[in-house]
Image (cartoon, rainbow, N blue to C red):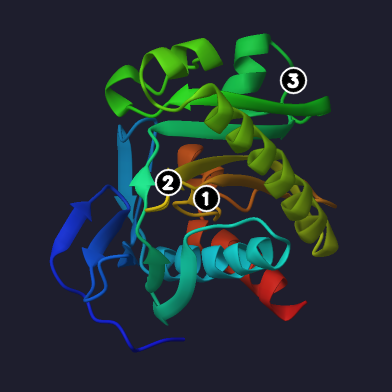
Amino acid sequence: MTTDYTKKELLYDGNEKQIYATEDPDKVILRYKDVTTAYSNIKRARFKGIGAYNNKISALLFTLLAQEGVENHFIDLVSEREQLCRKIQWINLEVVVHNWFAGTLARRLDIAEGVKCPNVIVDFRYNTDELDNPLINDDQAVALGLASYDELKVIDRMARETNRILLQRFAQVGINLIDFKMEFGRTSDGRIIVSDEISPDRCRLWDAATGKKLDKDRFRQDLGNIVDGYKEVYDRLSKE
């Protein structure tokens, strides 16, 4: 955990996170709020401690990805709810990786939730709440100026490699990685790296033995014990 950087001006104040400048123009401090949202911010609530778990889980998983050669923005933890990250130019795409049919994918294709996908499915979405994050294809992403064709190939490859690594890690602790959302950014020299967070707020995580949901679906579906689910994910990942 580093204490070498301090928060300067607020650069971004989002639904669930804030980004602060530091004395280094290439580094920022990302602060997780105790807030979770769903359905394009239609549903929103505060849960004490949820920000700390999202921060710590993301730190563990970003560290793992870096060790496996997947470059990302995470540098170090700063506090229970803050982490030091590389400053990036945000790419306005939401990349969703599916290993099982669940949520909107299951409803859109009329397939029962919990059926395993025969192949990995990678969806691109235009990341804008006003349009409810619509699905887009490569041509549409290029037409909107979100990324080039070459960059989209890099993003797809990094998403699939991230999925391979995370599937294996979660399986080691008895959790099925059903699906997850990713975001990407460009470094100052134009490299594509993984950004945002990887946490139960962005992943569907089901206990491999019981099917118990340990993720934001506990909030979406009013299942209760939301923070306890996040804590269980952190405890499993941090103890093995």
Q: Report the residue at 43% width, 64% height from top.
A: 50
84 lies above or below 46: below
Task: Give neighbour class at mark 3: few <14, some 14-19, many 20+ (Cα, 10 Å).
Answer: some
Q: Is residue 34 left or right of residue 119?
A: left
Q: Report the residue at 51% width, 37% height from top.
A: 221
Could you say which disc has been placed on residue 186 in the image?
A: 2
Could you say which disc has been placed on residue 143 in the image?
A: none
Amino acid tagged 2: Arg
Residue at the spot of label 3? 112
Residue at the spot of label 1? 193
Q: Is mark 1 in CB contact (under 8 Å) with mark 2?
A: yes
N-terminal-most mark, 2 or 3? 3
Whole-number angstrom distance, CA of label 2 to CA of label 3: 37 Å
Whole-number angstrom distance, CA of label 1 to CA of label 2: 6 Å
- For mark 3, give the secondary structure: loop
Q: Nearer the viewer, residue 219 or 31?
A: 31
Number of marks drawn: 3
Amino acid tagged 1: Ile
Residue 155 in percent (x, y) is at 59, 36
Q: Quadrant of residue 34?
A: bottom left
- For mark 2, give the secondary structure: strand
Q: Nearer the viewer, mark 3 or mark 1?
A: 1
N-terminal-most mark, 1 or 2? 2
Q: Quadrant of the C terminus?
A: bottom right
193 lies above or below 128: below
Q: Nearer the viewer, residue 117 or 38?
A: 117
